[in-house]
Image (tube, helix red, strand yellow):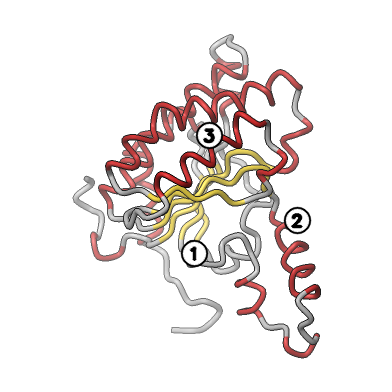
């Protein structure tokens, strides 16, 4: 661990937009799925290091509602990678007390993917370690729209709708808002990821493409976060 890191100021919840797999693969003259495979390896290390650092919640953006616009073979390959990931990682995750969580409308995923998700959720549901949330078929605007629909359908009066009530109707109802949002690959946008929850998150952009995002790069992002003056709209 980087000795410059303040162990007492590790963010409780880190959210990551894992971007750059395709560009990484293209630079190597390989198909995009080659990059997604490499990205899966990077994810394995970041999950492990989150536990080492003492992060309590880790949320990663794996498949957005807009990802369905990708070529059909790439989409199918991504879902197969999901099954492969859980197949190879679930025993280690469970042994380390990691609780797997899925945010997004994963009911529309292929049957094999849904089975892998169900198995992972069931196996780790009572674990009390890192809460590892994977955003699948997820979109921030869609999440907010669903929350509003749920509130209306429950018969709540408009005057009684509060920010707290909205938060309780999001996919992340039982998870605190992220203190830190990291985006790899240098793009300067949230891409519809946790747009309600990240209202006061610190955002750190790194030019590193996701497959090259090592635990050392992760620590650099946390170190930058620790150097920020978090005022939440107030004045110190």
Cα–Cα gap, marks 2 and 3:
24 Å
Cα–Cα gap, marks 2 and 1:
18 Å
Q: Quadrant of residue 148?
A: bottom right
Specify which label sits upstream in the sequence, 2 or 1. 2
Q: Quadrant of the N terminus?
A: top left
Q: Residue 81, percent across and down?
A: 54, 25
What residue is at 55 percent from the left and 69 percent from the top? 200
The circle drawn on residue 142 is: 2
Q: Does residue 63 appear left or right of residue 2 in this picture?
A: right
Q: Quick one: SS at disc 3? A: helix
Within 10 Å of disc 1 (Cα), the crowding (few <14, some 14-19, many 20+) is some
Q: Quick one: SS at disc 1? A: loop
Q: Quick one: SS at disc 2? A: helix
What residue is at 32 percent from the left and 40 percent from the top? 48
The circle drawn on residue 175 is: 1
Specify which label sits upstream in the sequence, 3 or 1. 3
Instruction: Please say if the residues under marks 2 and 3 sit with CB atoms less than 8 Å apart.
Output: no
Q: Residue 71, percent across and down?
A: 76, 22
Q: Quadrant of residue 78?
A: top right
Front position among marks 3 and 1: 3
Image height check: is 25 above or below 112? Answer: above
Return the residue at label 3: 116
Front position among marks 2 and 3: 3
Q: Residue 145, percent across and down?
A: 78, 63
Q: Residue 3, percent across and down?
A: 19, 50
What residue is at 62 percent from the left and 19 percent from the top? 32
Within 10 Å of disc 2 (Cα), the crowding (few <14, some 14-19, many 20+) is some
What residue is at 69 percent from the left and 56 percent from the top? 140
Of residues 235 and 159, the one nearer the viewer is: 159
Of residues 175 and 213, the one nearer the viewer is: 175
């Amino acid at each position: 661990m980087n000795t410059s890191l303040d162990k007492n100021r590790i963010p409780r919840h880190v959210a990551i937009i894992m971007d750059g797999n395709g560009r990484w693969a293209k630079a190597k003259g390989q198909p995009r799925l080659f990059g997604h495979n490499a990205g899966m390896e990077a994810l394995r290390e970041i999950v492990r290091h989150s536990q080492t650092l003492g992060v309590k919640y880790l949320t990663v953006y794996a498949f957005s509602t807009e990802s369905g616009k990708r070529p059909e073979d790439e989409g199918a390959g991504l879902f197969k990678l999901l099954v492969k990931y859980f197949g190879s990682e679930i025993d280690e995750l469970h042994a380390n007390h990691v609780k797997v969580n899925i945010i997004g409308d994963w009911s529309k995923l292929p049957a094999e993917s849904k089975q892998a998700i169900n198995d992972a959720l069931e196996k780790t549901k009572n674990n009390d370690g890192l809460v590892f949330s994977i955003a699948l078929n997820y979109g921030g605007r869609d999440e907010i729209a669903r929350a509003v629909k749920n509130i209306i359908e429950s018969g709540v009066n408009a005057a009684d709708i509060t920010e707290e009530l909205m938060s309780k109707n999001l996919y992340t109802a039982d998870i605190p808002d992220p203190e830190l949002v990291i985006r790899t690959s240098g793009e300067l946008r949230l891409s519809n990821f946790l747009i309600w929850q990240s209202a006061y998150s610190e955002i750190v952009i790194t030019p590193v493409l996701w497959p090259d995002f090592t635990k050392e790069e992760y620590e650099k992002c946390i170190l930058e976060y620790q150097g920020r003056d978090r005022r939440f709209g107030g004045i110190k």
